Image (tube, rainbow, N blue to C red):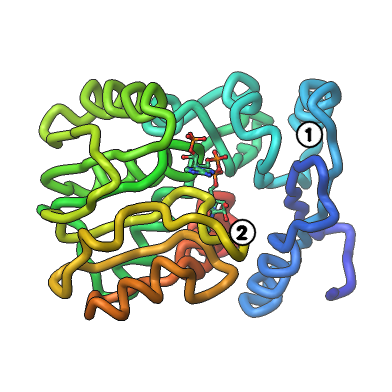
Amino acid sequence: MAETTGRTAIWGILADPIHHVKTPQALNALMEEHGVDGVMIPFHVGSGGLDSLVAGLRSMHNLKGFVVTVPHKTAIVDLCDEVSEQAQAIGAVNTVRREDDGSLVGEMLDGAGFVAGLRQGGVEPRERSVYLAGAGGAANAIAFALAQAGVSRLTVANRTRSKSEDLRQRLAKHYPAVSVEIGSPDPSGHEIVVNATSLGLREGDPLPLDVNGLSSSQVVAEIIMQPETTALLAAAKERGCRTHPGRPMLTCQLELMAKFMRMIP
Ligand code: NDP
């Protein structure tokens, strides 16, 4: 880590547990690359201490922003002074910028990272039909970002149907131009297929969708990063589909976070 000075700007990441977070390493390296006199520090805080920590951070003039992760992404929404319309609709914030007057501006960048990663991989979601497996935290953020990106049709399929129905209703309210449906495990008839469930992370997990519905004209995207080739991506490759791994969602998101917190220009 570069030497700190009286002028060093501080960014944080709020989590519980904290030992596994890798965001500080990635963003400290990015700052070093950009010649920024700044440092990102892990802040280990439990749910009971979140309010008082955030109140304190408001008064800290050299604190420029913080990343928020499990379990604080929902609770932080009400602690911000300003939250984007999309983050409000998703009900979660994962990046907060501290303005010079101490006010806190929150944004949710999980979905934007996914869409930026897709585009970086040469896949443009605008006007495309998308099948989305999952309706959890990541899937919610991705669904809103895909709607924002202008997909024509979005089908949400989730094990717990009430969660996909809730997501469908919120999307329809905010993006009336997008046709949102509840789907079955069969992804056929869609141009882009996305796994946004946690299935694929562990060996022996069931497949998140019916791979017999995949065909070579489709793009199949993952959000699972490890293993890099999940069972779904392997099955999609076998069927001649173009595949898109989970890692770019994270790498693109880190840059979006750094820009949102004004860490880099
Ligand atoms: P959540 O717990 O909020 O959601 C989990 C989702 O997976 C739900 O849709 C859940 O369905 C579904 N699911 C879990 N187990 C099963 C099962 N046995 N059968 C069917 N469906 C199942 O988690 P997140 O959305 O926060 O994260 C999901 C995954 O996304 C994580 O594992 C993580 O690896 C990955 N991720 C990747 C990121 C990246 O940058 N690449 C960023 C964020 C997350 P149900 O609602 O029915 O429980």
Q: Is residue 48 left or right of residue 88?
A: right
Find residue 202 and report its image quarter. bottom right
Residue 107 screen position, x and y as percent: 50, 39
Q: Please say if 67 is above or below 212.
A: above
Per the rendering, the mark at residue 263 is 2
Three-letter residue code for mark 1: Leu
Q: Please say if 46 is above or below 247.
A: above
- Give 214 or 62, whichever is nearer the viewer: 214
* Residue displayed at 89% across by 72% down: 3
- Quarter of the image with the N terminus in it: bottom right
Q: Is residue 234 left or right of residue 10?
A: left
Three-letter residue code for mark 2: Met
Q: How many marks?
A: 2
- Indicate the secondary structure of the residue bearing disc 2: loop
- Give 46 or 25, whichever is nearer the viewer: 46
Q: For the residue carrying disc 1, how many other residues have a C-alpha within 10 Å: few (<14), some (14-19), or many (20+)? A: some
Residue 261 screen position, x and y as percent: 58, 50
Find residue 124 and report its image quarter. bottom left
Q: Mark 1 sits on what residue? A: 57
* Residue displayed at 78% across by 46% down: 62
- Indicate the secondary structure of the residue bearing disc 1: helix
Which tag, 1 or 2, sits closer to the chain's start? 1
Q: Is residue 8 left or right of residue 99?
A: right
Residue 221 screen position, x and y as percent: 35, 64
Residue 28 screen position, x and y as percent: 73, 68
